[in-house]
Structures are given as C-alpha cells and as structure tokens.
Image (cartoon, rainbow, N blue to C red):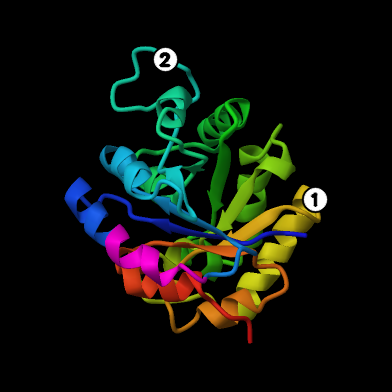
Amino acid sequence: MRKPVIAGNWKMHMTCAQTRDWMGTFLPLIAETPDDRHLVIAPPFTAISTLADVGAGSRVEISSQNVHWEGHGAYTGEISPAMLQEHGVRYAIVGHSEPRKYFSESDEQINHRARSAQAHDLIPIVCVGESDEQRSRGEAERVIRRQVEQGLEGLDPQRLVVAYEPIWAIGTGKTCESAEANRICGLIRSWVGSPDLIIQYGGSVKPANIDELMGMSDIDGVLVGGASLDPEGFARIANYKKG
C-alpha cells in the first residue's frame, strides 16, 4: 500500500523566526490529520534545526532541499548526509528543476546525490519533468524517461520518492490537468517497474486542486512550492479529502 507523501518545499524563504511562527499556526491545524499520509517540510538549511526543535513530537517530518554525494570535503556551499541526519532530517530533495536550470545539474550528478542519500538512510525525493518547449515539441515522455533511467539508476525503489514536476507548471499558476499528471505518473511507475513506488505531482498545487489530484490512481502525494508558505493553505493541502 503506497502511503502518500505531502511535502512543502520552502525554497529560499523563511527565517528561523518565521519558521517558529509558521509552525505555531500549522501544528494545531493538523492535530486531527489522518495518519495515512506523511507530512514533510523542506525548509532552507538555516531553519532545519529550528523546525526540528519546534516540531519535535509532531507529525511533521523534515526534508533537506539538497544533499551532496560525498560525506565531507572541499565542497563549498554543499551539505553532507551526516550534517542533515544530526538534525533529524529524513528526506532529501534532489534534481529539482531550479538547480537543473540555474546550476546545470546533470542527471548523473542527481543520481550521485540520490545514491548518497539512500546510502545514509535518507529518502531521496527525485524530481523529474519537462519544459514547456519540450512538451510542445512532443518530447515530454522521452525527456522524462531519460531523467528516470539516468537519475534513478541503482536506487532502491522501496526507499525512494519520485516527484513529477512539469517545469512549465512550477510557480506559473498553470497546473497540469489531473488526468495528464496521473498518466505521466503511471508511465514513470511502469518504467521503474515497481508498483509500490511513491510518485508525487508538483506544479502550482494549491488548496483548490488538491482533492482532485489526490483522487487520481497513480498520484501518491504532492510536492508543493509557493502554497506551502501559507500555513493555513498548506494545512488544507495536508488535510486533503479524496472526492
């Protein structure tokens, strides 16, 4: 049985003080959230310890926004698995479209990061997705399949989350139609060959569309960007009800 993962990626938002305020509003709103789902927050690195302190004993699990493939070394600006584990981090986002775009991250590098996460008992959330131009040229499936084959090579699908995030729907207000998102998630599952693989959808997820998305057969959660910055809105997402 696939247990959905509802994750909020704060990106480069939220100071430690803002994190405390956010959690103060959010935690009471999930007091009665069913335990048939994981609730995950990926704060900036500076707020991880604050989130761990404020959220101790709560339903909230912590993800990092990245992880390096080495345990230590001369890698300025990077973070190791051990540094994350010290603060109770359980997940690590890798391969998000933003580092792919801004820092030219390759599928090989993403695979190294994901392997490192699994080797250190972290669960990688590996992001895949096509651009608007690639979709308009009819290349979406080819691009996503390449990302899946190269980015997930050698990974254990039982300790993995894949997030399908069409780049054209991230932060644009455009949402991939639920049926199409479900179709792509089903294809990813078939390419990996694991019926138990957890596959999220990400891309302009909001309270208004969460119930429909979570009613899809092959969508096992969401990776939420901007809408996760509002604790009340994200609580509504966490408390989704399938139609």
Q: Amino acid at mark 1?
A: Ser
Q: Residue at x 61, y 40 (%)?
A: 151
Is residue 80 visible in the rendered structure shown here?
yes
For badge 2, the amino acid type reads His
Q: Is residue 35 left or right of residue 169?
A: right
Residue drawn at point x = 29 percent, y = 27 percent: 77
Q: Look at the image and tell me in which quarter the N terminus lies.
A: bottom right
Residue 237 numbered mark, or none: none
Q: Where the C terminus falls, by quadrant?
A: bottom right
Q: Is residue 94 left or right of residue 212?
A: left
Q: Secondary structure at mark 2?
A: loop
Q: Mark 1–mark 2 contact, CB under 8 Å?
A: no
Q: CA distance from mark 1 to mark 2?
A: 33 Å
The residue beneath circle 1 is: 194
Above/below status of 13 relative to 48: below
- Specify whether residue 128 is painted magenta: no
Q: Quadrant of residue 225?
A: bottom left
Q: Residue 159: x, y in percent? A: 67, 41
User: x, y (%) of residue 194?
Assistant: 80, 50
Residue 218 in which image quadrant: bottom right
Local SS, label 1 = loop
From the image, give the main secondary structure of the stretch colored magenta: helix
Q: Is residue 172 above or below residue 134?
A: below
As displayed, is residue 45 above or below residue 239? above
Stretch in magenta: 23-32
For residue 72, the mark is 2
Expressed as whole percent of the image width and height from the top left, the position of residue 167 reads: 45, 61
